[in-house]
Image: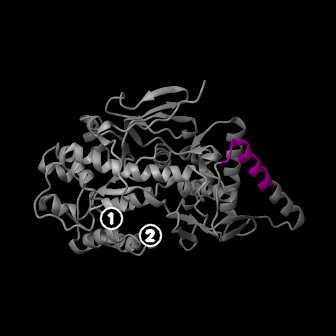
Amino acid sequence: MPKATKKRRISKKTSKKYKRDLTDYTSSEKPASKEQPKKASKKKIDQRLMKIHSFKDKKAIKQKGSVEKIPIAKNIIQVDEASTQETYERIHNTSQSLLKQIMETGKPSFEIPSRSSTNIIWDEVRDLLLLGEKITKRPFHSLASVVDSTRLMRVIEIVNELLLKNIHAEKREIFYADVNLFKEQKNSDKSIEDLSTMLKIVRNSTHIVANARGTCIGRLKIRDSGDDIDLERLGRGGWAISPFLDEVEIIESDAEFILVVEKDAALNRISEVKWWEEYPCIVISGKGAATMATRMFLRRLSKELVLPCFCLVDSDPYGHYIYSVYLRGSKRLSYESPFLATPGLHLLGVLSRDLEQYKIPDSCLLNMNTEDIKRVNQMLEEPFVQKNINWVKDLQLMLDTKQKAEIQAFIAHGFEYLTENYLPTKLSTGDWI
């Protein structure tokens, strides 16, 4: 069967071409209006998105052509999406190396890239958090590391079985494969990450997959394990993002942007009114902190469909952190950032300045606690945050007011306010970070 062609159709309303750069269309520098913003027209949103499309399309052509590639940062660990056979061979080579050490010195040890914060590097060119080349030796004959080494050997044994049988398992299943040895799931999770970095492969290549916690709905058609699925025709629940993304093919989409929402409450509000019918989009929910499968699927959609992406999270430190993980990756999984992060993602809301601009009542605001303030200060110390002056301003405003709010706070203006006023206005004015 010939491979389906991925399409991104833009409506006639948005057919006019624009030549200005994306950075010219944000109104982040504009002072907040004293009056509550009026509902935006669909025409203005179409024009705003077309400007982004024009910029994105030029960028896509540049990436597909023979123009120079983005240089890879030095002194970082590079991982691959290895095939089942390649992963098996790397495990075999690791085992052979251990056997050789035993025969020659009698003191075998693992060499594992350090995942400490001091070994996390921000690649400013690609705008990603990556893992440095610092190596940690883990000897077998040491009281300090013998347990960790044993657990790692057990995970290698389990992964070898998965590869030979060509089956997959979730992290929770790995823990239950040897509860007495792992004691807690955090220990088996650590060993899984150790193995991935040691073999320099993404976790999915070990056949250990993320759980299916994220949801996607809207203007998208996919093929999942041979079954064609129209994400507009799945009711309000949407499609549970599969951890087996290697078996998912993107068929086509006429969406004009992608919206990532932090919470199911926002997704339910959007799906109930079928918001994507009036505003052609794909909506993704990570149900809080996104799983690897959700982040990987978002990156894939953004890359293959060449669509602008926006993020809607709570106006609190944790919401900003979730956005940063989607944007540049997490420190814990920095070695997989090139496969998980979406550097072009914009923070649409809820921004700290929105609380006053959209007149959120005091009764819907929450006071920040000590942990909240600590997290904001930590984010302000990050180099990638400091490079974005508008992000710094919004976090600083959060510190000054010491107030936060959830997405649901907009219900104070009516149940339909989020979909009929807030989101359309933000998209039409370009008021994002």
Nearer-the-camera pick, 181 or 75? 75
Circle 1 Cα neighbour tier, 10 Å, few/some/many (<14 / 14–19 / ≥20): many
Magenta part, dominant SS: helix
Q: Which residue is painted at 67% across and 40% down in the image?
A: 162
Q: Which label sits on residue 233?
A: none
Q: Quadrant of residue 232?
A: top left
What residue span does the magenta drawing correspond to?
A: 82-95
| 376 w.r.t. 98: above or below | below
Q: Give the residue at x 55% y 61%.
A: 334
Q: Tell me where residue 164 sits by quadrant.
A: top right
Kind of residue at disc 1:
Pro
Q: Residues within 10 Å of mark 2 (few under 14, many from 20)?
A: some
Q: Say which of 428 and 287 sits in front.
A: 428
Tell me the residue that label 2 is attached to. Answer: 384
Write the residue at 38% across / 58% down. Answer: 323
- Which element carries disc 1, helix, strand or loop? helix
Q: Picture coordinates of residue 77 (x, y %)?
A: 64, 63
Q: Quadrant of the N terminus?
A: top right
Q: Position of residue 181 (x, y in %)?
A: 63, 53
